[in-house]
């Protein structure tokens, strides 16, 4: 079975400070992991994905995430937040070997940026 | 430009009045799916389709129908909408349903059922 837990429903940081959005997953098979971003009134856009290559994954807009199998985590980070980063972020788990052919979304983390 | 389009973007309707939300993709993807997004619940899959004439239920299929007569189109049908179907709906497509394949999302359809 697969599941994904985003540990914070809302994160607020000051502009220029680091961002950390936390995601834990559970998967019976080797998972693929994704982070998607949703800006207000927009669809979801892929930020980055992990597919069993490098454990540190770099994405768009300066975001990166590290796959830690021992901790079953895939936290999203950015060294310095910009106002334009304010959005909803979703962690997603998927497995190529899942007979259910399902993709599981986390409940989302809303990121607010203080000026 | 590679994209997924949905229409309409906004819809207000009354209980019981049948409606259809269209979805179309121009990337020749075999896999398409519908999600609904509700506050605090993330995205939940309604139906998905692995190919033309092949559809299956997701996690929350009750009250919805779909069809896949052409590869590019995957309409969502609400035969008799109810207020609990008020939500934000997204169509998505990808080249494969699971594994390391990005999903491409439409812009969303905000549905209100009164």
Image (spheres, coloured by chain):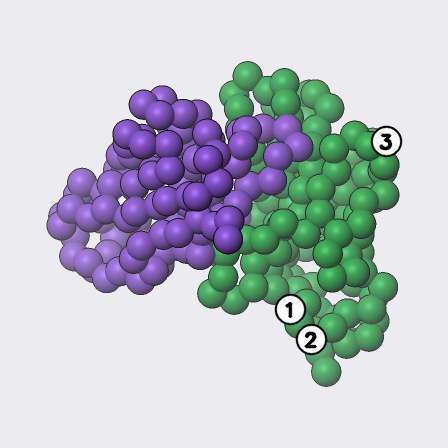
Q: Residues within 10 Å of mark 1 (few under 14, many from 20)?
A: many
The foreground one among B70 and A28 is B70
Tell me the residue at 85%/43% (across/down): A56
**Left/right of residue A102 with respect to residue B110 in the rendered view:** right
Camera sees residue A71: no
Gap between marks 1 and 2 measured at Cα: 6 Å
Whether pointer 2 and pointer 3 mark residues with C-beta atoms closer than 8 Å, the reply is no
Closer to the chain start, of discs 1 and 3, is 3
Q: Quadrant of the C terminus of chain A?
A: bottom right
Res. B26 image quadrant: top left
Q: Which mark is residue A70?
A: 3
Q: Is residue A85 above or below residue A29?
A: below
The hue of chain B in the figure is: purple
Residue at position x 59%, y 20% from top? A98
Residue A32, x across and y down, in percent: 69, 32
Q: Quadrant of residue A12?
A: bottom right
Q: Determine the secondary structure under disc 2.
A: helix
| Vertical position of residue A75 compared to residue A32: above or below | below
Tell which subunit mark 2 falls on: A
Residue furthest to the left: B17
What chain does mark 1 sit on?
A
- Percent position of residue B83, x then y: 25, 53
Judging depth in this view, the residue of A54 and A106 nearest the camera is A54
Chain in green? A
Residue ID at (71%, 78%): A114
Q: Specify the quadrant that holds the N terminus of chain A.
A: top right
Pointer 2 residue? A83
Query: Which disc number belongs to residue B92?
Result: none
Contact? badges 1 and 2 (CB < 8 Å): yes
| Left or right side of A85 for A44 | left
* Residue for badge 1: A86
């Amino acid at each position: 079975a697969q599941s994904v837990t985003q540990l914070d429903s809302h994160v607020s940081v000051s502009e220029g400070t680091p961002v950390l959005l936390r995601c834990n997953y559970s998967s019976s098979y080797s998972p693929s992991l994704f982070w998607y971003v949703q800006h207000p009134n927009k669809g979801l856009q892929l930020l980055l994905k992990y597919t069993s290559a490098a454990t540190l994954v770099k994405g768009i807009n300066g975001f990166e995430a590290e796959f830690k199998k021992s901790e079953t985590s895939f936290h999203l980070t950015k060294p310095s937040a910009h106002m334009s980063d304010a959005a909803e972020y979703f962690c997603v788990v998927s497995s190529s070997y899942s007979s259910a052919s399902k993709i599981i979304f986390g409940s989302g983390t809303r990121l607010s940026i203080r000026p | 430009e590679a994209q997924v389009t949905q229409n309409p973007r906004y819809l207000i309707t009354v209980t019981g009045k049948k409606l259809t939300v269209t979805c179309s993709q121009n990337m020749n993807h075999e896999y398409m799916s519908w999600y609904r997004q509700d506050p605090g619940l993330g995205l939940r899959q309604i139906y998905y389709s692995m190919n033309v004439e092949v559809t299956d239920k997701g996690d929350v299929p009750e009250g919805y129908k779909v069809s896949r007569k052409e590869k590019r189109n995957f309409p969502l049908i609400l035969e008799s909408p109810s207020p609990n179907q008020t939500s934000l709906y997204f169509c998505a497509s990808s080249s494969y349903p699971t594994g390391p394949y990005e999903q491409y999302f439409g812009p969303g359809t905000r549905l209100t059922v009164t």
